[in-house]
Image (cartoon, rainbow, N blue to C red):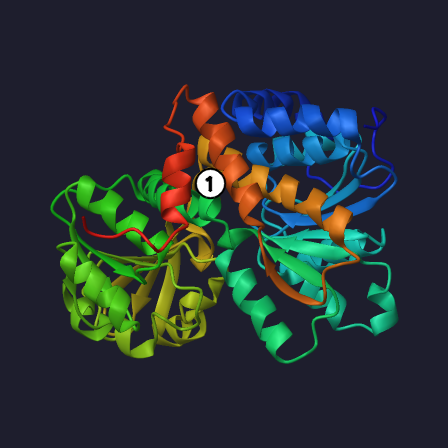
């Protein structure tokens, strides 16, 4: 890993590096699986002489992943996957440790895309995405611009949706491993990470008491499941809205009220979207919200809330608190929009706790190494994380937690693979 200052970077303030190093070290204490993988990478050098471009949330947890990749020989260039998710201290520290970082908290759209371009200018052979912006931008160029790319990994649900759409349309040019689909990612990161960190962001931004509030969760995927459970645990009266009948039925069986968002809007104190779709909270919903309702998003893109419609209905907007915009509608009702409609858990808080990102980023690291080792065998398209990687991550995490589990005997293994035995 390079120890000199990275030659190319764009961060808010390099003087914040010392504080960033402290944050990275603190997160690292709770990431024992990734630490083991880093040690393995240092010895095996799976990324020797390879360029890796990442578009990820620039947080202390991500820094531990990036440093593990660099320890494995990768030349890493990193940009942010959301304008409000960068921890400037972490970005500065990574630069001092030899990583080319292009990320500033609060960057506007033009700067955001210039940073994506800066990463692509390094001609990465492996890309690592959170939302598929890097891969999408690369595919808007001539095919010759991606001829050097061995493949990519994708971290989040929204990105996997975009990539599967590209693959279905026949435009995806190289293999992508859908890290989000690993059981040790979405069952834990999405459910426990998003659930806790979204509540954290909501409380930090507003300091409201959740007990007794009517809390609407839009979407009951793994993120919605976690958020609904955490909100109920804080004493909120939780309503779930869904478009998938099976998920809606599951929410009913879990004891949540399920109804349309139009039905829920007049009684909602808080509405949070976690769907991966667009215009989930739309014009008709704003017209039905009661005075003082808080609206936020924890999905990847800020498209989940129809911000243009909200602006059209707004007579006056002011800052009620940092990251809390008060929209006074023409009829006098107030709607409070948090964090510009961007990822609440990363914009108003610090994202997922390190212990859950330990598994997610262990999958990222091992999937990237697998991609390098098997790139010639994988066709263009979206590929699942190999089962053996998923199971290895789970086993390493259990070991780190000091948990032992049973092992099948030879007899039990044979029984499970046979069909002859039945009722005696």
Residue drawn at the location 20% of the way across and 56% of the way down: 269
Give the side of residue 2 with respect to residue 167, left or right.
right
Task: State how many labels appear.
Answer: 1
Q: Note whether 282 is above or below 386 in the view shown.
A: below
> Can I make out residue 323 in this image?
no
Could you tell me residue 179's position as x and y percent?
56, 51
Residue drawn at the location 53% of the way across and 21% of the way down: 26
Q: Judge the density around disc 1: few (<14), some (14-19), many (≥20) Cα neighbours within 10 Å.
A: many
Give the side of residue 380 with respect to residue 316, left or right.
right
Could you tell me residue 60's position as x and y percent?
57, 32
Q: Note whether 137 is above or below 37 in the view shown.
A: below
> Which residue position is annotated with label 1?
351
Residue drawn at the location 42% of the way across and 66% of the way down: 304
Give the side of residue 148 with respect to residue 342, left or right.
right
Q: Work out whether residue 4 or residue 29 is closer to the camera in this orientation and state it.
A: 29
In the picture, the quarter occupied by the N terminus is top right
Q: Quadrant of residue 62?
A: top right
Q: Work out whether residue 266 or residue 1 is closer to the camera in this orientation and state it.
A: 1
Residue drawn at the location 30% of the way across and 73% of the way down: 243
Q: Quadrant of residue 139?
A: bottom right
Q: SS for tag 1?
A: loop
Q: Note whether 176 is above or below 65 in the view shown.
A: below
Q: Work out whether residue 240 or residue 117 is closer to the camera in this orientation and state it.
A: 240
Could you tell me residue 65's position as x and y percent?
63, 35
Could you tell me residue 267's position as x and y percent?
14, 63
């Amino acid at each position: 890993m390079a120890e000199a200052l990275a030659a190319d970077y764009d961060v808010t303030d390099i003087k914040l590096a010392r504080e960033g190093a402290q944050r990275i070290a603190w997160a690292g204490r709770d990431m024992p699986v990734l630490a083991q993988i880093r040690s393995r990478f240092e010895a095996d050098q799976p990324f020797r002489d390879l360029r890796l471009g990442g578009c990820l949330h620039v947080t202390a947890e991500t820094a531990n992943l990036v440093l593990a990749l660099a320890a494995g020989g990768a030349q890493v260039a990193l940009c942010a996957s959301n304008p409000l998710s960068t921890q400037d201290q972490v970005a500065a520290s990574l630069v001092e440790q030899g990583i080319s970082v292009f990320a500033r908290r609060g960057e506007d759209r033009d700067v955001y895309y210039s940073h994506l371009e800066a990463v692509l200018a390094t001609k990465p052979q492996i890309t690592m995405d959170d939302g598929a912006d890097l891969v999408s931008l690369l595919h808007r160029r001539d095919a010759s611009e991606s001829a050097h790319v061995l493949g990519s990994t994708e971290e989040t649900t929204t990105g996997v949706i975009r990539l599967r759409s590209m693959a279905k349309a026949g435009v995806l040019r190289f293999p992508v491993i859908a890290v989000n689909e690993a059981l040790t990612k979405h069952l834990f990161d999405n459910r426990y990470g998003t659930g806790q960190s979204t509540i954290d962001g909501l409380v930090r931004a507003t300091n409201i008491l959740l007990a007794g509030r009517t809390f609407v969760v839009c979407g009951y995927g793994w993120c919605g499941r976690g958020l609904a459970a955490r909100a109920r645990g804080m004493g909120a009266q939780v309503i779930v809205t869904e478009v998938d009948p099976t998920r809606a039925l599951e929410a009913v069986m879990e004891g949540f009220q399920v109804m349309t968002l139009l039905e829920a809007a007049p009684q909602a104190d808080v509405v949070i979207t976690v769907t991966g779709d667009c215009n989930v909270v739309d014009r008709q919903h704003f017209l039905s919200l009661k005075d003082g309702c808080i609206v936020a998003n924890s999905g990847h893109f800020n498209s989940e809330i129809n911000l243009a419609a909200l602006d059209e209905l707004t007579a006056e907007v002011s800052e009620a608190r940092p990251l809390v915009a008060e929209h006074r509608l023409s009829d006098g009702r107030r709607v409070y929009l948090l964090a510009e409609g961007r990822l609440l858990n990363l914009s108003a808080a610090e994202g997922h706790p390190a212990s859950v990102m330990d598994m997610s980023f262990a999958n990222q690291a091992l999937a990237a190494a697998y991609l390098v080792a098997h790139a010639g065998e994988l066709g263009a398209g979206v590929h699942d994380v190999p089962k053996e990687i998923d199971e290895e991550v789970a086993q390493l995490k259990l070991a780190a937690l000091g948990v032992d589990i049973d092992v099948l005997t030879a007899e039990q293994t044979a029984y499970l693979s046979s069909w002859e035995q039945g009722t005696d």
